[in-house]
C-alpha cells in the first residue's frame, strides 16, 4: 500500500497534489456516510435486531469520524507538501475501515428476508460505491481499499443464493464493481496527466486550480488553461528575445532583463544584488526616480532578500501593509509594498538575489507563470555570471602562459641579446681606455676629449635602450589599448627584429604601406605577435640554401590593417594549416606549440583574425588583421591581461 512515488521530484509533487485533492473532496463522502447510514438503520429498525443495527451504525460512524478528524488535521498541517505518503496511508486505512463497515451490510441482507429491503440495501451500497469514485479517485489505492471490502461481502452472499433474482443482483454487483473500478482508474489517470501537464507547463498551474475539484475539466476550465499557456509562451518569448539579442557586454542583457521583468510583473524597481555575509550590494538596478543606485550597500537584515535566500521557492507578496510583512524592517524603512524575488546561484554557491518591487500594492496576485519566469531569469543570470568567472579564470591562465612565452622567447634570444649589449659595452671600454691613454701622454684638446666622451655617451645610451626594451618586453602588465600606428609598433622592436634575423643570416625586408590609419591595440601584445611570426619564419628558412629572406608588410584591407610575415622557407603542408593555431601542435622537433595559439588569442582579443596561406613559390605567409581606431572603440572580446 506504499503509493508514494520515489522516482522523480516531479512525480512526488504530483502525488502530493493528488493527496491534497483527496482530502479536499473527502468531506463530501464523509458527510454522505454520516447521513445515509442512520437512514439505512432506520429503515431496518423494525426488521433487524436493534443491538446489531446499533453496533453496525456505531462502528461505521466511528470510521467516518476518524476520516473527519484526519481531514481536519490535514487542513491544519504546517507544510502543505510534507509527508504526503503518510497522509495518504492514514486516510486509505480509514477508508478501508469504512468500506469494511459498509460491507458489513451483508448482515442486514441475511437478516432481512424481504427482496424489497435487500434491493434497497444493495441500492444504498451501490450509491456509496459510486460516490467513492468521485471523492477518492485522486489516490487510486484509497478507492480500491474502500471499494473491495464494501462490495465483495454482499455480492458474494447474493451470488451464493439459490434464488435467481438475488443471484442476478450479485452478478450485477460484480459488473457494477468492475465498472466503478474502471471508472475510478480512468479518472485517476486523467487527473495524473492533467497534474503533470500543469507542473511541466508553468502557465497551466494557475488555471488548473479550478480543475482540482473535478477529474473532468469543463469548457470554462479549459479556456483558463489555454489562456495561462499563452501567457507562459509569451513570457518565454520575451525572455528569449532578451537573452538571444547580441550585445557587447552581459551588463546590457541584465539591464534589458530587469526592464522586461519590471514590465512583465508590473513593478517599478528591478535589482540584481550580491550578498556576502551580512552585506547586501546593488550590482544592477532599474528605478524610476533613482531611489536606489548601483553600488549602494545595505544591511541584509534590512531587506526582503534575507527571507528570499531562506525560501525554497520565489518569494512574493502583493500588499505588504495588509499582511504581516508590514512589520518587516524593509517595509518600515522603505515602504516597499509589492515584492517578487528569488535567489541567484553561481555554480553551487549563492551569489545574491534577483528581485522586483514597487512602492505601490500590486492589484493582482503573482501567478505561477510569474514565479516560474523569475526562476528562469535567475538561472540565466547565474549561468552568465558563472561563464564570466570561468572566462576570467581562463584569461588569467592565458596571461600567465603568454608571459611565460615571452620569457621563453627572451631566453632563446639570450645569446643574441648578450652580443648586442656586449658590443656597446666593448666600445665604451675602448673609448674610455683611449681617452685615459691620451690624458696620460700629455695635454688633450677639449674638442678631442669631448668627441671621445660623446661616443661613450652614445654607446651607453644604446646599451640602456636595449636593456629597457628587454625589460619592457619581459614585464607582465594589464593590456592598454592605445591609438598607435603600425610603423611605431615596428620601430620599438626594430632592434629585436634586426638582431634575430642578423644572427641567423636572414635578410629582413619591410614593406609598410603609406598613410596607414592608426589602430587600437596594446603595443606590447601586438609586438609579441610580430616577433613570434618573424621567429617562426626564421626557423622555417633554416634548411634553405638560397638567400634566406623574410618580408614584413602592412597594408589597409577590408577588415582593417593587415600585417603579413612572408618567408621563402620549406613551406607548409596544406592539410596542417587549420591545426597550426591549436595549442601544443607544432612542426618543430623542439617546439612547444604555444606561440601561434597565444598569437591567435591576442589577435582575436583585439577584434582581428590570424591565418596562414602557402606561397605560390617557396615558403608560407602568416597574416593577421587589426581593426582601425576609427572602426572600433574597444575590443569586442575579453581582453588578455599580459
Image: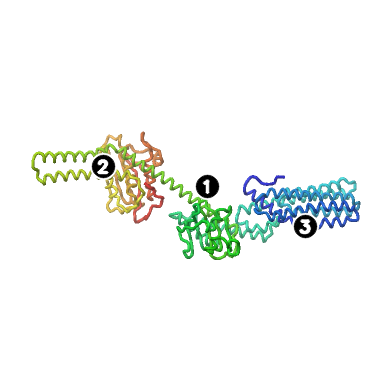
Q: Residue 565: name its quadrant.
A: top left
Instruction: Please state the horizontal and vertical placement of residue 217, each as a whole percent of the image.
Output: 69, 57
Query: Of callouts 3 and 2, which one flags the residue occurring earlier in the amino acid sequence?
Result: 3
Circle 1: is it few (<14), some (14-19), or many (20+) Cα within 10 Å?
few
Q: Is residue 305 above or below residue 1?
A: below
Instruction: Please state the horizontal and vertical placement of residue 395, each as a whole percent of the image.
Output: 41, 46
Instruction: Please state the horizontal and vertical placement of residue 59, each as a whole percent of the image.
Output: 82, 51
Query: Of callouts 3 and 1, which one flags the residue occurring earlier in the amino acid sequence?
Result: 3
The CA span between labels 2 and 1 is 54 Å
Whether the residues at callouts 3 and 2 have beta carbons within 8 Å, the answer is no
Circle 2: is it few (<14), some (14-19), or many (20+) Cα within 10 Å?
few
Q: Which residue is mark 3?
A: 31
Q: Which mark is residue 348?
A: 1
Whether residue 381 is visible: no
Tag nearer the camera, 3 or 2: 3
SS under mark 3: helix
Q: Which residue is mark 2?
A: 498
Tag nearer the camera, 2 or 1: 1
Q: Quadrant of the N terminus?
A: top right
SS under mark 2: helix
Amino acid at each position: 500500500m506504499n503509493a508514494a512515488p520515489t522516482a522523480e521530484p516531479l512525480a512526488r509533487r504530483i502525488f502530493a497534489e493528488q493527496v491534497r485533492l483527496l482530502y479536499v473532496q473527502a468531506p463530501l463522502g464523509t458527510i454522505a456516510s454520516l447521513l445515509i447510514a442512520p437512514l439505512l438503520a432506520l429503515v431496518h429498525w423494525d426488521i433487524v435486531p436493534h443491538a446489531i443495527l446499533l453496533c453496525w451504525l456505531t462502528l461505521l460512524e466511528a470510521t467516518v469520524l476518524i476520516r473527519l478528524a484526519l481531514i481536519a488535521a490535514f487542513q491544519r498541517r504546517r507544510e502543505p507538501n510534507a509527508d504526503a505518503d503518510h497522509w495518504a496511508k492514514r486516510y486509505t486505512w480509514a477508508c478501508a475501515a469504512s468500506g469494511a463497515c459498509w460491507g458489513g451490510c451483508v448482515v442486514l441482507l441475511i437478516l432481512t428476508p424481504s427482496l424489497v429491503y435487500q434491493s434497497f440495501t444493495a441500492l444504498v451500497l451501490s450509491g456509496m460505491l459510486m460516490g467513492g469514485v468521485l471523492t477518492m479517485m485522486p489516490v487510486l489505492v484509497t478507492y480500491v481499499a474502500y471499494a473491495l471490502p464494501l462490495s465483495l461481502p454482499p455480492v458474494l452472499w447474493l451470488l451464493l443464493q439459490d434464488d435467481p433474482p438475488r443471484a442476478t443482483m450479485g452478478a450485477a454487483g460484480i459488473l457494477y464493481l468492475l465498472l466503478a473500478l474502471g471508472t475510478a482508474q480512468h479518472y485517476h489517470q486523467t487527473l495524473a496527466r492533467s497534474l503533470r501537464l500543469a507542473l511541466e507547463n508553468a502557465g497551466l498551474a494557475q488555471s488548473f486550480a479550478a480543475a482540482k475539484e473535478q477529474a473532468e475539466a469543463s469548457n470554462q476550465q479549459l479556456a483558463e488553461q489555454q489562456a495561462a499557456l499563452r501567457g507562459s509562451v509569451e513570457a518565454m518569448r520575451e525572455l528569449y528575445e532578451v537573452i538571444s539579442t547580441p550585445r557587447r557586454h552581459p551588463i546590457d542583457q541584465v539591464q534589458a532583463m530587469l526592464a522586461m521583468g519590471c514590465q512583465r510583473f508590473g513593478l517599478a524597481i528591478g535589482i540584481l544584488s550580491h550578498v556576502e555575509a551580512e552585506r547586501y550590494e546593488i550590482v544592477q538596478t532599474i528605478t524610476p526616480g533613482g531611489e536606489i543606485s548601483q553600488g549602494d550597500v545595505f544591511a541584509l537584515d534590512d531587506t526582503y532578500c534575507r527571507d528570499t535566500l531562506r525560501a525554497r521557492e520565489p518569494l512574493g507578496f502583493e500588499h505588504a501593509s495588509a499582511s504581516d510583512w508590514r512589520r518587516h524592517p524593509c517595509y518600515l524603512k522603505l515602504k516597499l509594498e509589492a515584492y517578487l524575488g528569488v535567489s541567484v546561484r553561481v555554480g553551487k554557491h549563492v551569489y545574491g538575489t534577483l528581485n522586483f518591487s514597487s512602492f505601490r500594492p500590486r492589484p493582482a496576485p503573482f501567478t505561477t507563470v510569474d514565479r516560474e519566469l523569475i526562476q528562469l531569469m535567475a538561472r540565466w543570470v547565474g549561468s552568465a555570471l558563472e561563464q564570466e568567472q570561468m572566462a576570467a579564470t581562463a584569461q588569467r591562465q592565458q596571461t600567465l602562459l603568454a608571459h611565460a612565452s615571452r620569457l621563453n622567447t627572451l631566453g632563446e634570444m639570450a645569446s643574441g641579446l648578450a652580443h648586442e649589449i656586449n658590443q656597446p659595452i666593448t666600445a665604451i671600454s675602448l673609448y674610455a681606455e683611449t681617452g685615459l691613454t691620451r690624458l696620460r701622454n700629455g695635454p688633450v684638446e677639449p674638442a678631442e676629449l669631448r668627441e671621445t666622451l660623446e661616443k661613450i655617451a652614445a654607446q651607453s645610451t644604446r646599451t640602456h635602450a636595449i636593456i629597457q626594451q628587454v625589460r619592457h618586453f619581459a614585464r607582465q602588465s594589464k593590456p592598454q589599448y592605445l591609438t598607435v600606428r603600425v610603423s611605431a609598433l615596428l620601430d620599438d622592436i626594430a632592434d629585436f627584429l634586426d638582431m634575430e634575423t642578423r644572427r641567423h643570416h636572414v635578410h629582413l625586408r619591410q614593406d609598410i604601406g603609406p598613410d596607414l590609419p592608426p589602430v587600437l591595440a596594446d603595443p606590447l601584445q601586438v609586438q609579441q605577435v610580430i616577433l613570434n611570426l618573424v621567429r617562426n619564419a626564421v626557423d622555417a628558412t633554416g634548411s634553405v640554401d638560397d638567400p634566406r629572406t623574410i618580408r614584413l608588410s602592412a597594408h589597409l584591407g577590408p577588415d582593417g590593417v593587415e600585417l603579413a610575415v612572408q618567408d621563402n622557407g620549406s613551406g607548409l603542408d596544406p592539410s596542417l594549416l587549420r591545426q597550426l593555431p591549436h595549442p601544443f601542435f607544432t612542426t618543430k622537433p623542439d617546439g612547444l606549440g604555444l606561440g601561434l595559439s597565444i598569437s591567435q588569442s591576442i589577435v582575436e582579443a583585439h577584434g582581428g583574425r590570424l591565418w596562414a596561406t602557402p606561397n605560390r613559390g617557396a615558403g608560407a605567409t602568416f597574416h593577421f588583421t587589426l581593426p582601425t581606431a576609427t572602426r572600433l572603440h574597444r575590443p569586442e572580446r575579453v581582453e588578455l591581461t599580459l
